[in-house]
């Protein structure tokens, strides 16, 4: 099953937001956009890892929701 969203947790407050993959996310990872089918698992992990490492100051943690 392909993930259709990821979670964004604020380190300051602990708030968690569920963020669906957008067309821009698919384009950034170089895969065809299929919002209903979800992001291929490898690309979803790569995108989340990229979001975690590209922060100047660590304010959020991006994760995939466990299946």
Image (cartoon, rainbow, N blue to C red):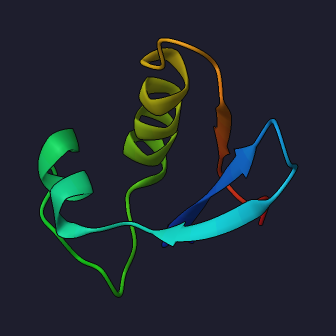
Residue 26 position, x and y percent, is: 21, 56
Q: Residue farthest to the right?
A: 14
Between 33 and 62, the one lying in front of the other is 62
Residue 3 in sight in this render: no
- In this rendering, the answer to whether 30 lies above or below 34 is above
Residue 60 position, x and y percent, is: 66, 36
- In this rendering, the answer to whether 11 lies above or below 13 is above
Residue 17 in sight in this render: yes
- In this rendering, the answer to whether 54 lies above or below 5 is above
Q: How many marks?
A: 0
Residue 56 position, x and y percent, is: 47, 12
Q: Indicate the quadrant where residue 15 lies.
A: bottom right
Residue lying at 82% horizontally and 38% vertically, measured from the top left:
12
Residue lying at 18% horizontally and 67% vertically, measured from the top left:
23
Between 49 and 54, the one lying in front of the other is 54
The quarter in which the C terminus is drawn is: bottom right
Residue lying at 42% horizontally and 25% vertically, measured from the top left:
50
Is 5 displayed left or right of 60 in the figure? left
Is 32 displayed left or right of 1 in the figure? left
The quarter in which the N terminus is drawn is: bottom right
Residue lying at 57% horizontally and 14% vertically, measured from the top left:
57
Is 5 displayed left or right of 11 in the figure? left
Q: Residue farthest to the bottom?
A: 36
């Amino acid at each position: 099953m392909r993930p259709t969203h990821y979670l964004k947790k604020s380190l300051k407050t602990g708030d968690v937001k569920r963020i669906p993959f957008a067309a821009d996310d698919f384009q950034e990872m170089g895969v065809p956009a299929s919002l209903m089918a979800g992001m291929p698992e490898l690309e979803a992990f790569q995108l989340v890892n990229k979001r975690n490492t590209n922060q100047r100051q660590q304010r959020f943690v991006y994760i995939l929701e466990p299946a």
